[in-house]
Amino acid sequence: MTDVVWRPEHDPSIRPPLEEGAVYRPDILQVIDNAIDGLRGDLRKLSLDIHDHPELRFEEKYAHEAYTAFMESQGFVVTKHYILPTAWVATYTHGQGGRVLGVNSEMDALPGIGHACGHNLIGISGVAVACAAKAAMEQFGIDGKVILLGTPAEEGGFGKVRLFEKGAYEEMDMCLMWAISCPGIKYIRKTLRN
Ligand SMILES: [Zn+2]
């Protein structure tokens, strides 16, 4: 077992329902773990690439190209310039019906200090979640859809609000986003070190 995916047992203060087969499914977590572990090198490369090309809000052209190319390589259906010029959407559908999982990937940097607040890490985390969900859906035959949104202009541009107003989130049953905080940072650091 790797340590890529954070698990409830890593934190003794968290008490989720741990009975196997209920909400907590270690077998699905293992597939998620393996999928992200397999992408570790590519995700790190993508993160550093975005970090080396900081772009301000609504100017995320490099990130737009890098992320959409990556998601295409992972078997997602990609729509470039989705609603906003630098927004994009990558979808994966398995079977028919089921739940729709939404995920956000931030892209923009800050004036003068680049990716100081880590949108490159938030971005690749969204990619990792979408790819891992796809792997689990394939492996366990789970019908549903994953929608990964590349969301421009988090820093003062209300990128997600604009996308929301145009219906980008309408189809989703839930929507996830990762941001840098504890305990996640501990594991991200560990992952990047490796
Ligand atoms: Zn930020």
Image (spheres, helix red, strand yellow):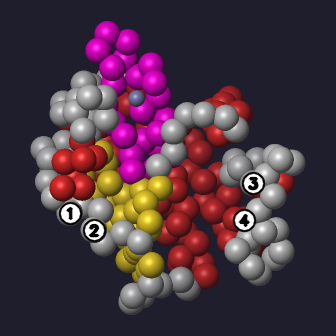
Instruction: Give the mark, 2 or 4, whose residue is nearer the N terminus.
Output: 4
Residue matched to label 1? 167
Q: Is mark 4 within 8 Å of ligand 1?
A: no
The reply to whether the magenta stretch includes residue 26 is no
Residue matched to label 4? 30
In the picture, measured across the screen, residue 64 lies left or right of residue 126, that is left
Up/down of 157 relative to 176, above or below:
above
Callout 1 touching callout 2 (CB < 8 Å): yes
Q: How far separated are the C-alphas under marks 4 and 3? A: 10 Å
Label 2 Cα neighbours within 10 Å, binned few <14 / some 14-19 / many ≥20:
few
Up/down of 141 relative to 15, above or below:
below
Instruction: Give the mark, 2 or 3, whose residue is nearer the N terminus.
Output: 3
Q: Which residue is painted at 58% across and 72% down in the image?
A: 136
Q: How far separated are the C-alphas under marks 4 and 1? A: 34 Å
Q: Is residue 76 visible?
A: no
Residue matched to label 3? 7
- From which residue to which does the magenta span run? 104-126
User: Residue 192: percent from the left, percent from the top?
Assistant: 63, 32
Q: Which residue is painted at 70% across and 38% down in the image?
A: 183
